Image (tube, grey):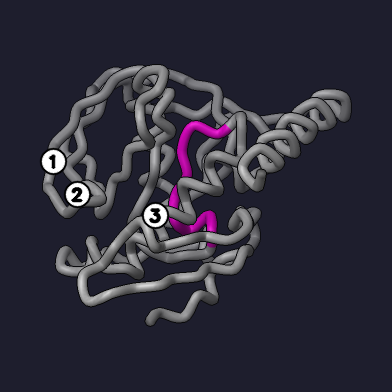
């Protein structure tokens, strides 16, 4: 049984001879760490393909999904943001369509980038209350593994392309403020409004 030392909340795992993922339970919402903490500033380790369906890796994925669900302004999350230095990120399902499940990308790699770039506004769950303009490729293609260990290739434009680039930067120890041409902090009133939404989201998860 793996030791659960990476998460803000307690992680409880029960297992049988065959892994039953319904028995993996994450208690409390994992803490999203903030800039300045080591896991956000170093390159994350690849996940061995043979370990993708392991209880340990699946528990990390579940923790990431729960952390993301507690952030109403979040569209994706990378494993280093919950202090797990693994090359995994999760994109919120609503980015694809209403009711779509969250989508997991493991060991992602950008294989193609469009020549055209544009400045896009970005924020980050690990750089709270700061927003800025970052130059991103308009279209990218990535290859990665799913949470079931299947290798896939996926192209993207617009918001999804931006997310792919932002999250892979996370896995390489890069924050958007390291690339931003300009950025600014939101007002106290906007902070309060955002915090209230986050508190409501977290309460709905723990009910």
Quadrant in the picture for the C terminus: top right
Distance Cα–Cα, label 1 vs label 2? 6 Å
Quadrant in the picture for the N terminus: bottom left
Where, by quadrant of the figure, is residue 162 drawn? top left
- Image coordinates of residue 16 in percent, x first then y, are 28, 74
Q: Which residue is mark 2?
A: 145
Residue at the farthest right position: 188
Q: Is residue 80 magenta?
A: yes
**Is 114 positioned to the left or the right of 11 in the image?**
left
Residues shaded magenta: 74-82
- Does label 3 or label 2 sit earlier along the sequence? 3
Please give the name of the residue rendered at 25% of the width and 50% of the height, measured from the top-left corner: 147
Please give the name of the residue rendered at 40% of the width and 72% of the height, measured from the top-left corner: 14
- Image coordinates of residue 13 in percent, x first then y, are 44, 71
Q: Which residue is mark 3?
A: 61
Q: Is 67 placed above or below 3 here? A: above
Please give the name of the residue rendered at 50% of the width and 70% of the height, measured from the top-left corner: 12
SS of the residue under disc 1? strand
- Does label 1 or label 2 sit earlier along the sequence? 2
Q: How would you rate the neighbour count of disc 1 (Cα within 10 Å): few for under 14, some for 14-19, many for 20 or more?
A: few
Q: Which residue is mark 1?
A: 152
Q: Nearer the viewer, mark 3 or mark 2?
A: 3
- Image coordinates of residue 6 in percent, x first then y, are 53, 70
Q: Is residue 188 magenta?
A: no
């Amino acid at each position: 049984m793996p030791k659960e030392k990476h998460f803000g909340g307690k992680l409880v795992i029960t297992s049988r001879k065959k892994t039953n993922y319904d028995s993996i339970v994450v208690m409390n919402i994992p803490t999203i760490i903030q800039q300045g903490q080591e896991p956000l500033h170093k390159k994350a380790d690849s996940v061995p393909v043979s370990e993708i369906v392991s209880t340990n890796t699946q528990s990390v994925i579940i923790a990431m999904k729960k952390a993301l669900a507690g952030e109403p302004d979040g569209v994706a999350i990378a494993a280093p943001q919950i202090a797990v230095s693994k090359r995994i990120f999760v994109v919120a399902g609503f980015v694809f369509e209403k009711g779509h499940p969250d989508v997991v990308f493991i060991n992602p790699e950008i294989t193609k980038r469009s020549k055209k770039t544009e400045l896009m506004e970005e924020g980050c769950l690990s750089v709270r209350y700061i927003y800025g303009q970052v130059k991103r490729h308009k279209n990218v293609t990535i290859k990665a593994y799913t949470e079931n260990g299947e290798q896939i290739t996926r192209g993207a434009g617009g918001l999804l392309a931006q997310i792919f680039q932002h999250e892979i930067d996370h896995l390489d120890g890069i924050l958007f403020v390291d690339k931003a041409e300009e950025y600014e902090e939101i007002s106290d009133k906007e902070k309060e409004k955002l915090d209230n939404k986050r508190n409501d989201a977290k309460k709905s998860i723990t009910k």
